[in-house]
Image (tube, grey):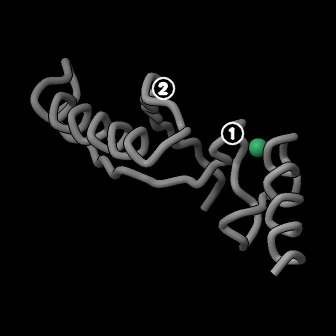
Amino acid sequence: MRKAESHFIIVRPTDSGYSSKDAATASLNACRAIVVDIKRHVDNVSDRDMNIETEYVCSHCGSAWTERSTEYNGGCCDEDEKGTRETASATAAT
Ligand SMILES: [Zn+2]
């Protein structure tokens, strides 16, 4: 056995944004439409395996989500840090 190369294509719709629940739905629907179109017709490719994958990103800057929290991504951007300060203030006030 030896190390071998394997190649694949990642198709990522980029026109739906990341800032709202509707954008997430639009992105998923775009992926589903792309899968249907690829399955319908790709020249010189007789078989392919396609999966729609989900990745989690910051709704403000689009950075990969790396934290267990759903509200704080380790300070990936100013808005992420700002949201944490506002949450801490609201908790302290109650
Ligand atoms: Zn961010």
| 90 horizontally vs 33: left or right | right
**Where's residue 63, x and y in %?**
72, 42
**Where's residue 37, x and y in %?**
17, 28
Q: Is mark 1 within 8 Å of ligand 1?
A: yes
Q: Earlier in the sequence, mark 1 or mark 2?
A: 2
Front-most of 83 and 8?
83
Front-most of 73 and 4?
73
Front-most of 74 and 1?
74
Q: Which quarter holds ligand 1?
A: top right
Q: Which residue is rendered at x = 33% and y = 37% of the image?
A: 26
Query: Type of residue at label 2?
Result: Thr
Query: Type of residue at label 1?
Result: His
> Residue 60 — which label?
1
**Where's residue 40, x and y in %?**
10, 30
| 79 horizontally vs 4: left or right | right
The quarter of the image holding the C terminus is bottom right
Packing grade of label 2 (10 A; few <14, some 14-19, many >=20) is: few
Residue carrying label 2: 14
Residue projecting furthest to the front: 93
**Image height of 17 relative to 91, above or below:** above
* Disc 1 from disc 2: Cα separation: 15 Å
| 60 horizontally vs 83: left or right | left
**Where's residue 14, x and y in %?**
48, 26
Residue projecting furthest to the left: 40
The quarter of the image holding the N terminus is bottom right
Q: Which residue is rendered at x = 49% and y = 43% of the image?
A: 20
